[in-house]
Image: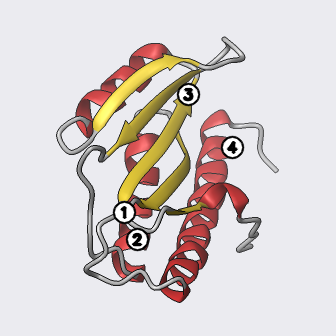
């Protein structure tokens, strides 16, 4: 074990990224079992967090090219959150490959701003069904 902060962050990020990818695979499997197809239009909501407001704002600025973004202090007031959504529009074609690619991208872009990709929810507004990684407990180690 090393005390080097960069090494600790790199290890943490790698474990977190593997966990999020595993969550995406499970989530997409649940969605498929519930009848989501490539033609299903889904609303996508997600959250990143970090300790430095300016990092979250820069991350939100980058993601605002494709998502509606908002940055605010978290309820613990010691960190910041960036919330993103595709609403009022949506996305389709959320198969396993696209889902894991999107999650991998979100992990990587968050890491590039010293932030953490936390949670996401996909909602089928027509059938009023939602799927979120918050309810998945997986350890891909």
User: For the residue carrying disc 4, how many other residues have a C-alpha within 10 Å: few (<14), some (14-19), or many (20+)?
Assistant: few
- Rounded to the nearest whole Å, what is the CA distance between mark 2 and mark 1? 5 Å
Ranked by sequence position, the earlier of labels 4 and 3 is 4
Ranked by sequence position, the earlier of labels 2 and 3 is 3
Relative height, residue 32 to residue 76 (above, below): below
Disc 4 is placed on an element classified as: helix
Which residue is rendered at x = 51% and y = 55% of the image? 121
**Residue 32 at x, y = what percent?**
48, 85
Relative height, residue 68 to residue 53 (above, below): below
Q: Which residue is mark 1?
A: 102
* Quadrant housing residue 7: top right
Q: Which residue is mark 2?
A: 99
- Horizontal side of 37 relative to 123 (left or right) equals left
Foreground mark, 4 or 2, reads 2
Residue contact between numbered discs 3 and 1, judged by CB atoms under 8 Å: no
For the image, the number of numbered tags is 4
Relative height, residue 140 to residue 130 (above, below): below
| Front-most of residues 55 and 29 | 29
- Rounded to the nearest whole Å, what is the CA distance between mark 4 and mark 1? 25 Å
Disc 1 is placed on an element classified as: helix
Foreground mark, 3 or 1, reads 1
**Residue 85 at x, y = what percent?**
35, 43
Foreground mark, 4 or 3, reads 3
- Rounded to the nearest whole Å, what is the CA distance between mark 2 and mark 3? 23 Å
Q: Which residue is mark 4?
A: 8
Relative height, residue 1 to residue 35 (above, below): above
- Rounded to the nearest whole Å, what is the CA distance between mark 4 and mark 2? 27 Å
- Rounded to the nearest whole Å, what is the CA distance between mark 4 and mark 3? 16 Å
Foreground mark, 4 or 1, reads 1
Residue contact between numbered discs 2 and 1, judged by CB atoms under 8 Å: yes
* Quadrant housing residue 61: top left
């Amino acid at each position: 074990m090393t005390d080097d902060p960069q090494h600790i962050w790199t290890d943490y990020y790698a474990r977190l990224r593997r966990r999020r990818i595993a969550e995406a695979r499970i989530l997409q499997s649940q969605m498929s079992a519930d009848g989501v197809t490539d033609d299903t239009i889904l609303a996508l909501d997600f959250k990143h967090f970090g300790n430095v407001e300016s990092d979250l704002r820069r991350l939100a600025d980058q993601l605002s090219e494709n998502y509606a973004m908002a940055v605010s202090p978290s309820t613990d007031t010691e960190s910041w959150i960036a919330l993103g959504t595709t609403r009022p529009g949506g996305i389709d074609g959320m198969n396993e490959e696209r889902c894991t690619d999107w999650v991998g991208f979100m992990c990587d872009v968050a890491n590039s701003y010293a932030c953490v990709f936390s949670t996401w929810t996909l909602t089928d507004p027509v059938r009023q069904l939602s799927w979120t990684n918050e309810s998945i407990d997986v350890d891909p180690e």
